[in-house]
Image (spheres, grey):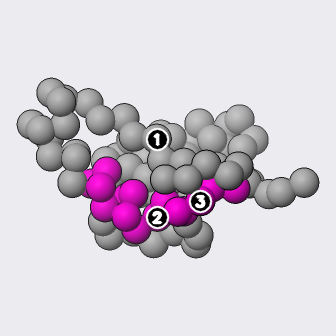
């Protein structure tokens, strides 16, 4: 059995609420909430999957595209644990 972790990264104050929800549901050992910008934070490992909630109009008006590209280039494994290639 492999261990897994979920990293929740958000620069806004909602990170505190997310952390509380994670703790209330007893998932603190799996879900790690990190408050900060993806461009500035450090993760302990590369990840298999990135899920982004992009909000706004087509990424363009909130400049999220650059952040998603940074996350992909910095943190996404070239080959995931499940064998998918990115």
Q: Residue beneath label 1, please?
A: 51
Q: Where does label 2 land, which residue?
A: 75
Residue 49 is one of the magenta-drawn residues:
no
Work out whether residue 29 or residue 49 is closer to the camera in this orientation and state it.
Answer: 49
* 85 lies left or right of 42: right
Q: How many marks?
A: 3
Residue 46 position within the rendered picture, expressed as x and y whole percent measured from the top left? 55, 66
Which residue shows up at 54% across the image and 48% down it? 49
Of helix, strand and loop, which one carries label 1? loop
Direction left: furthest residue: 61
Residue 33 seen anywhere in this rendered image of the structure: no
Which residue appears at 9% of the width and 37% of the height?
61
Mark 2 is surrounded, within 10 Å at the Cα level, by few (under 14), some (14 to 19) or many (20 or more) other residues, namely some
Residue found farthest to the top: 57
Specify the label residue 79 is tagged with: 3
Between marks 2 and 1, how big is the CA–CA gap?
A: 12 Å
Residue nearest the viewer, comparing 29 with 71: 71
Residue 66 percent coordinates (x, y):
21, 54
Q: Secondary structure at mark 2?
A: helix
Q: Is residue 47 left or right of residue 3?
A: left
Q: Identify whether 79 is placed above or below 45.
A: above
Q: CA distance from mark 3 to mark 1?
A: 16 Å
The answer to whether residue 57 is seen in the rendering is yes
Residue nearer the viewer, 27 or 3: 3
Magenta region, residue range: 67-81
Query: Is 23 in front, or is 55?
Result: 55
Q: Residues within 10 Å of mark 3 (few under 14, many from 20)?
A: few
């Amino acid at each position: 059995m492999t261990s897994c972790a979920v990293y929740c990264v958000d620069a806004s104050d909602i990170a505190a609420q997310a952390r509380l929800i994670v703790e209330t549901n007893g998932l603190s050992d799996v879900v790690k909430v990190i408050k900060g910008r993806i461009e500035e934070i450090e993760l302990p490992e590369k990840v298999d999957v990135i899920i982004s909630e992009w909000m706004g109009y087509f990424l363009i008006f909130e400049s999220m595209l650059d952040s998603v590209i940074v996350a992909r280039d910095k943190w996404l494994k070239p080959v995931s644990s499940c064998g998918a290639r990115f």
